[in-house]
Amino acid sequence: MKERRKYERRMWFESIYHIGDIIKPIGLIFNISQEGANVWIDYSKVDENAHFTIRLRPPGGAKILGYVDFDVDKIWSEKTNTLAHQNLGCHFESLKETQDNQLKQLLQYFVRLERSKALKEGKVKF
């Protein structure tokens, strides 16, 4: 059965950080869309509440300087084989115009990257 989503997800495997009293690595991002992200986090480093802030470091090719911070709400969670980690579906909350622009720029980077990869592999013809 094909999933129906409003926005296409882009694969991305990168560390994510929790913004709190100190900035600390909390896990990995698996994919990202205009609405949210799928992340794998160390639950011992994040409060049990469903709302927190994550920091992402965009790839250099995305031409976004520094880091991007997003307030997220946990939509769903799934236990993993380890007791300390969970797979979470997160929704981006209250994006400011700058964050929205950075997110769109980041997603466009992944679209270009996927197209370039497909061209190199001969999967796309003109």
Image: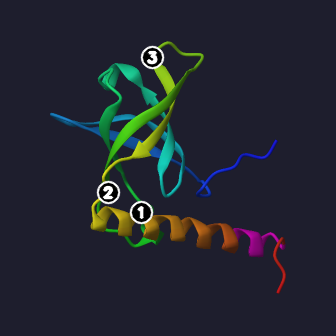
List x then y, in percent, for residue 73: 38, 37
Residue type at mark 3 is Ala
Q: Which residue is mark 3?
A: 84
Specify the principal SS of the magenta part.
helix
Indicate which disc residue 103 carries: 1
- Determine whether the residue tagged by mark 3 lies in a helix, strand or loop: loop
Is residue 121 found inside the magenta-colored segment of the image? yes
Residue type at mark 2 is Leu
List x then y, in percent, for residue 51: 32, 34
- Quarter of the figure with residue 74: top left
| Within-10-Å neighbours for mark 3: few <14, some 14–19, many 20+ | few
120 w.r.t. 1: above or below: below
Mark closer to the chain start, 3 or 2: 3
- Determine whether the residue tagged by mark 2 lies in a helix, strand or loop: loop
112 w.r.t. 110: above or below: below
Q: Nearer the viewer, mark 1 or mark 2?
A: 2
Q: Which residue is mark 2?
A: 95
| Within-10-Å neighbours for mark 1: few <14, some 14–19, many 20+ | many
Badges 1 and 2: C-beta atoms under 8 Å apart?
yes
**Magenta stretch bounds:** 117-122
Disc 3 to disc 2, how far (Cα)?
29 Å
38 w.r.t. 108: above or below: above
Disc 1 to disc 2, how far (Cα)?
9 Å
Q: Nearer the viewer, mark 3 or mark 2?
A: 2
Q: How many marks?
A: 3
| Within-10-Å neighbours for mark 2: few <14, some 14–19, many 20+ | some
Frontmost residue, 99 versus 5: 5
Disc 3 to disc 1, how far (Cα)?
29 Å
Badges 3 and 1: C-beta atoms under 8 Å apart?
no
- Quarter of the figure with residue 79: top right
